[in-house]
Image: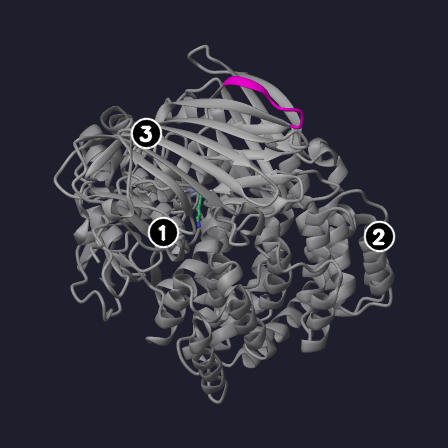
């Protein structure tokens, strides 16, 4: 049979970037009529299409029952087209086509959460990115086909809310029990941005006036009881709209913006044009029910989806290989937005911590791929930390190099050139180059090759000449699939400090990049190079990669004293934190003494607690067991890491005990001037409390229990609950019971109840099984699955023992029911090959045994990659 989809799908199902071909037909408009019934849904589509190039008319469709099809008014016979499980091909189609199809689909039994699916007894929603629309109707379901959508939705009146993208044109009744709504989206869009919602939901309304004077109706739809938890999201939405006008000159372009919350969702949220669909976890925010971290996440995801309106929707991707074009840029934009909401240093710390904990290990293991991959089997497997987070870092590097003004000129040029188009990473870099006047073309190398570069630096001080020479060398580990690795441009933001006075030098060097900012940025873009600073009057301490100016592994031969110096004197909060991390990593992995860290923290903390309590709290971050494990490439023994980390925590608890108690008792979140400060104080107090408990302070559990009881705030309550549960305190069970009774009808809070138990350091196969057997555990709700699995996985000793079976079983179960999630969860085991024997062989055997039992492209591709090490 002729399979002529674009890009070409080969027999082994791998799709290659090099095979990209323009669409044969474009769609001018599509009229959809979606009629929802209890046992099925009928979708009628009318597509007006024009030929662009020679070839067959290919419409993609999956799990569709074709009832009728006609072309330009003529009913087609089965001999006029070829239909298989993935597509419908019409040979010899004329140049202008009006195609009418009618299909039956089954959202009521769709557990994959892709296409149109029933998310709850009273709610139907869609998820079409990347390839879900083909599960709704036959369509050239690819991002470079942009059409005008008109959507009629019809359903029983027990679903009063009928939404689709764009403007509401008409509503009406159909007989006694049914009604309809017709929506039209004036903007041309690819099918992955189509959405509709049918349900019984309440709504929070507000308005926003854009910089152009457009009056926009804002609506957040959720369950009635959750509406009071939607105010923070609404404020964040308005804030994002203003922020994008001010920072990127991008106003909103429709008269309404709707957000719908559902708990049955595979990821955080989806940027459908004018009708975002969100996981409840990324909309609902209220200090009584959600933690501070969750509140920050809500704001950043609201911003992220809103920012997609320009970076993703108005300018979209030519093909799915370009995914990082929209995701990397939008993550960079939401990170910058969040830096304005709280301590900017802490936002950067948190973003880098995610990058290092997820993207670095991904990029050094069997799932490593370039931010823009050049082949895939299942695109859903490529919504990865590399595409998102490393993609964001590439944009950040270019922005750092250009400085604010030139970067803005570059993005202006991108929007000017490509509005309304489906483009590539090359187009983005070319527009930035043209707009800024700075040639950025060699940044394309970052997009095209995998791996985290190693950046080795050395420094030489010449006291007589008063010069300081910094030499750099970069290298990448060989990669079987990408043999021709090239040097990448690395912006190194740096500062020199006078080791005697602690003051920062004003940098003098001709090699610094002129980007209009005070701090120095050196663009290192060769395999080796050096830079000389003059006027360095005393031996300096150098601070490199300030604000983490490039996603590389830095090696510099610091002494512990120099790191302690940076902890105290560096004014860049991120590098202050980085110094603590490097120091502690040495204690943990190379048996250095912790005393230097303890002293430096004692010197630094008091003033910092006043200034930035959130940053102060982060300076207590002890690298997690998972992160430490990811730094070990062979003979990894999770139990040894756990033991060392516990020993360090015990030392810190002992050495800092008094300090922790005083800090805990002195701080009051209710006395802080704003949310960000209060959040910092809460974070710090929770850490102090954990330290006190570890130190064996008899009072610690009483303090924890009283914190648990005397608060309405979830961060405080959960922080206390964690201390009690993880330390098996006497009060643990009564607090757990209380928590359950309070929050049993609040799904997101109840997720926390599951997580706190699943993440108990001494969780066992039995304790996890008890959670899974709990009546509130539900394999149909991804958030609940993640609550337990994520908790379990926070203790690698558990992940790599009884956790292996847990994750393998989940992948097997979800393979058919929800392969996107199944594949994602299986990835937890991707670094199995680094384990010491006999664990390594045991895990390998479990993975091999899974192979014949799974079928989905998602799980199979992930498993094959994991095993091809
Ligand atoms: N674009 C969506 C992700 C869709 C994932 C499909 N598996 C969310 C986001 O990045 O905003
Ligand atoms: Zn996104």
Marks 2, 3: nearer the viewer:
3
**Mark 2 lies on residue:** 741
Badge 1 marks a residue whose secondary structure is helix
Magenta span includes 466:
no
Residue 399: x percent and y percent?
32, 38
Can see residue 556?
Answer: no
Badge 3 marks a residue whose secondary structure is strand
Residue 85: x percent and y percent?
35, 55
Give residue 831's quadrant in the image: bottom left
Badge 2 marks a residue whose secondary structure is helix
Crowding around mark 1 (Cα neighbors within 10 Å: few <14, some 14 to 19, many 20+) is many
For image coordinates 35% across by 67% down, the residue present is 364
Q: Which of the two residues, 398 or 378, is positioned nearer the viewer here?
A: 378
**Mark 1 lies on residue:** 387
Query: Horizontal placement of 81 versus 574: left or right?
Result: left
User: What is the C-alpha distance between the residues marked 3 and 1?
Assistant: 27 Å
Crowding around mark 2 (Cα neighbors within 10 Å: few <14, some 14 to 19, many 20+) is few
Marks 3, 1: nearer the viewer:
3
Which quadrant contains ligand 2?
Answer: top left
Marks 1, 2: nearer the viewer:
2
Q: Main secondary structure of the magenta part?
A: strand
**Mark 3 lies on residue:** 147
Among all residues in the image, which is located at the extreme bottom?
A: 838
Q: In the rendered view, would you say 615 is above or below 50?
A: below
Residue 89: x percent and y percent?
25, 47
Q: Which residues are magenta?
A: 169-177
């Amino acid at each position: 049979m002729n399979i002529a989809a674009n890009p070409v799908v080969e027999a082994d199902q791998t799709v290659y970037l090099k095979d990209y071909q323009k669409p044969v037909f474009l769609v001018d408009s599509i009229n959809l009529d979606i009629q929802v019934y209890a046992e099925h849904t009928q979708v009628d589509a009318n597509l007006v299409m024009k030929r662009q190039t020679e070839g067959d008319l290919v419409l993609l469709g999956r799990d569709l029952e074709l009832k009728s099809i006609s072309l330009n008014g003529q009913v087609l016979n089965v001999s006029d087209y070829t239909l298989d499980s993935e597509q419908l091909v019409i040979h010899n189609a004329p140049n202008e086509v009006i195609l009418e199809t009618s299909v039956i689909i089954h959202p009521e039994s769709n557990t994959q959460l892709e296409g149109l699916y029933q998310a709850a007894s009273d709610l139907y929603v869609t998820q079409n990115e990347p390839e879900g629309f083909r599960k709704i109707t036959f369509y050239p379901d690819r991002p470079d086909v942009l059409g005008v959508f008109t959507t009629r939705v019809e359903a029983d009146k027990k679903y009063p809310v009928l939404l689709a993208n764009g403007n509401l044109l008409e509503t009406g009744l159909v007989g006694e029990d049914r009604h309809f709504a017709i929506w039209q989206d004036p903007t041309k869009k690819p099918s992955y941005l189509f959405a509709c919602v049918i349900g019984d939901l309440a709504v929070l309304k507000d308005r926003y006036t854009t910089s152009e004077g457009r009056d926009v109706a804002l609506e957040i739809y959720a369950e009635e009881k959750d509406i009071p938890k939607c105010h923070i999201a609404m404020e964040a939405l308005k804030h994002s709209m203003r922020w994008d006008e001010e920072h990127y000159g991008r106003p909103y372009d429709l008269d309404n913006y709707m957000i719908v919350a559902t708990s049955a969702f595979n990821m955080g949220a989806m940027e459908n044009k004018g009708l975002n669909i969100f996981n409840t976890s990324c909309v609902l925010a209220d200090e009584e029910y959600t933690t501070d971290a969750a509140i920050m996440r809500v704001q950043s995801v609201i911003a992220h989806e809103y920012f997609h309106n320009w970076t993703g929707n108005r300018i979209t991707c030519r093909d799915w290989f370009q995914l990082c074009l929209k995701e990397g840029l939008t993550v960079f934009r939401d990170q910058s937005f969040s830096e304005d909401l709280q301590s900017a240093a802490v936002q950067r710390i948190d973003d880098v911590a995610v990058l290092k904990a997820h993207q670095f290990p991904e990029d050094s293991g069997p799932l490593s791929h370039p931010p823009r991959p050049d082949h895939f089997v299942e695109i859903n497997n490529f919504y990865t930390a590399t595409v998102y987070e490393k993609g964001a870092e590439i944009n950040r590097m270019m922005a750092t190099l250009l400085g604010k003004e030139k970067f803005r000129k570059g993005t202006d040029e991108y929007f000017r050139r490509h509005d309304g188009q489906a483009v590539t990473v090359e187009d983005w870099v070319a527009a930035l180059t043209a707009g800024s006047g700075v040639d950025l073309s060699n940044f394309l190398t970052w997009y095209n090759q995998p791996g985290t570069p190693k950046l080795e630096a050395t420094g030489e001080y010449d006291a007589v000449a008063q010069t300081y020479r910094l030499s750099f060398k970069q290298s990448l580990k060989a990669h079987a699939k990408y043999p021709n690795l090239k040097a990448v441009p690395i912006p190194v933001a740096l500062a020199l400090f006078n080791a005697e006075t602690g003051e920062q030098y004003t940098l003098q060097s001709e090699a610094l990049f002129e980007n209009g900012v005070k701090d120095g940025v050196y663009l290192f873009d060769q395999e080796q190079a050096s830079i000389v600073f003059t006027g360095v009057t005393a031996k300096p301490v150098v601070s490199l990669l300030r604000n983490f100016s490039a996603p590389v592994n830095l090696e510099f031969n610091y002494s512990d004293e120099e790191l302690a110096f940076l902890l105290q004197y560096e004014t860049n909060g991120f590098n202050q934190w980085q110094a603590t991390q490097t120091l502690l990593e040495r204690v943990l992995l190379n048996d250095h003494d912790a005393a230097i860290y303890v002293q430096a923290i004692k010197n630094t903390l008091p003033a910092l607690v006043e200034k930035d309590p959130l940053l102060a709290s982060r300076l207590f971050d002890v690298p997690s067991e998972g992160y430490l494990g990811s730094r070990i490439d062979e003979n990894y023994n999770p139990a040894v890491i756990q033991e060392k980390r516990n020993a360090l925590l015990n030392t810190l608890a002992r050495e800092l005990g008094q300090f922790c108690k005083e800090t805990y008792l002195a701080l009051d979140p209710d006395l802080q001037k704003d949310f960000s400060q209060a959040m910092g104080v809460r974070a710090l107090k929770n850490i102090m409390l954990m330290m006190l408990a570890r130190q064996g302070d008899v009072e610690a559990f009483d303090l924890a229990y009283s914190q648990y009881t005397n608060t309405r705030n979830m961060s405080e309550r959960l922080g206390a609950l964690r201390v009690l549960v993880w330390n098996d305190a006497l009060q643990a069970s009564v607090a757990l019971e209380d928590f359950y009774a309070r929050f049993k009808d609040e799904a997101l809070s109840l997720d926390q109840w599951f997580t706190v138990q699943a993440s108990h350091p001494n969780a066992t196969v039995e304790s996890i099984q008890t959670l899974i057997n709990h009546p509130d555990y539900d394999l149909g709700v991804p958030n609940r699955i993640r609550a337990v699995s994520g908790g379990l996985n926070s203790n690698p000793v558990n992940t790599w023992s009884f956790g292996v079976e847990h994750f393998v079983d989940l992948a097997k179960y979800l393979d058919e029911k929800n392969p996107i999630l199944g594949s994602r969860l299986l990835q937890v085991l991707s670094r199995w090959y680094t384990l010491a024997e006999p664990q390594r062989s045991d895990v390998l055997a479990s993975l091999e045994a899974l192979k014949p039992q799974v079928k989905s492209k998602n799980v199979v591709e992930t498993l094959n990659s994991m095993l091809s090490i």
